[in-house]
Image (cartoon, rainbow, N blue to C red):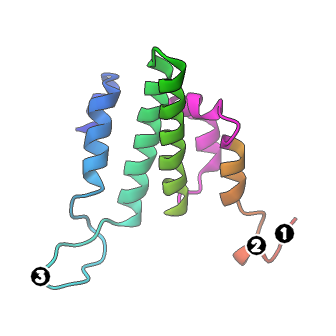
Amino acid sequence: MGLSLTEKKEWQQAQAYFERALELPGTGVKRFRDKPRLISDGEKIAALYNIACCQSQLAALAPEDEEAKSCIHNGLVALAGCLEAGYDDFQQVRSDADLEMLRTSDKFDGLLRRFERSGGFMNIFKK
């Protein structure tokens, strides 16, 4: 539902669905017999990436500078969560049109550098 709302450019409503997806049972590990499965890393990554996209688009539509800054901040937080969960397509993050407003932040490149690996297992083989 969230993706169909993004196609209609209804960013706020779409974001609500992506946020809800973070709270729903997922396809991940089932830790307790009487509890639902946890959300998988892939599901978490998808939801957080889409939240970041929604926040970026809302920043572009924001009528006030402070509101845009708040959206950009929230988008960067969601993107950081996505990267922490294991998303590593940095080229996509740097080129996705939906994330354009996040790239205007001076914190964007620092965030990506924090997660990009220079090479090898646990950064042992640095360039």
* Dot 3 amino acid type: Asp
Q: Quadrant of residue 105?
A: top right
Position in image of residue 125 (x %, y %)? 82, 74
Nearest-to-viewer mark from 3 and 1: 3
SS label for mark 1 = loop
Q: Residue at x 32, y 38 (%)?
A: 15
Image side of residue 62 versus residue 76, left or right: left
Identify which residue is drawn at 26% across, 67% down: 27
Give the residue displayed 77% in from the left and 67% down from the top. 119
Query: Mark 3 = which residue?
Result: 34
Q: Is residue 90 above or below residue 117?
A: above
Is residue 10 depicted above or below 84 in this figure? above
Tag 2 residue: 123
How crowded pointer 1 is (Cα within 10 Å; few <14, some 14-19, many 20+) is rated as few
> On screen, 58 above or below 83?
above
Label 2: state its secondary structure.
helix
Residue topped by disc 1? 126
User: Is label 2 or label 3 in front?
Assistant: 3
- Assess whether mark 1 and mark 3 are in contact (beta carbons under 8 angstroms): no
Separation of residues labelled 2 and 3 (CA atoms): 40 Å
Query: Is the Cβ of the residue at disc 1 closer than 8 Å to that at disc 2?
Result: yes
Q: Is residue 56 magenta?
A: no
Answer with mark 3 or mark 1, whichever residue precedes in sequence.
3
Q: Label 2 neighbourhood size at 10 Å, few (<14), some (14-19), many (20+)?
A: few
Identify the residue at image location x=20%, y=84%: 32
- 104 or 44, which is in the foreground? 104
Give the image location of residue 21, x and y in percent: 27, 52
- Residue 99: give x, y in percent of width and height: 54, 33
User: Horizontally, is 86 left or right of 3 in the view?
Assistant: right
Question: What range is drawn magenta here?
Answer: 87-108
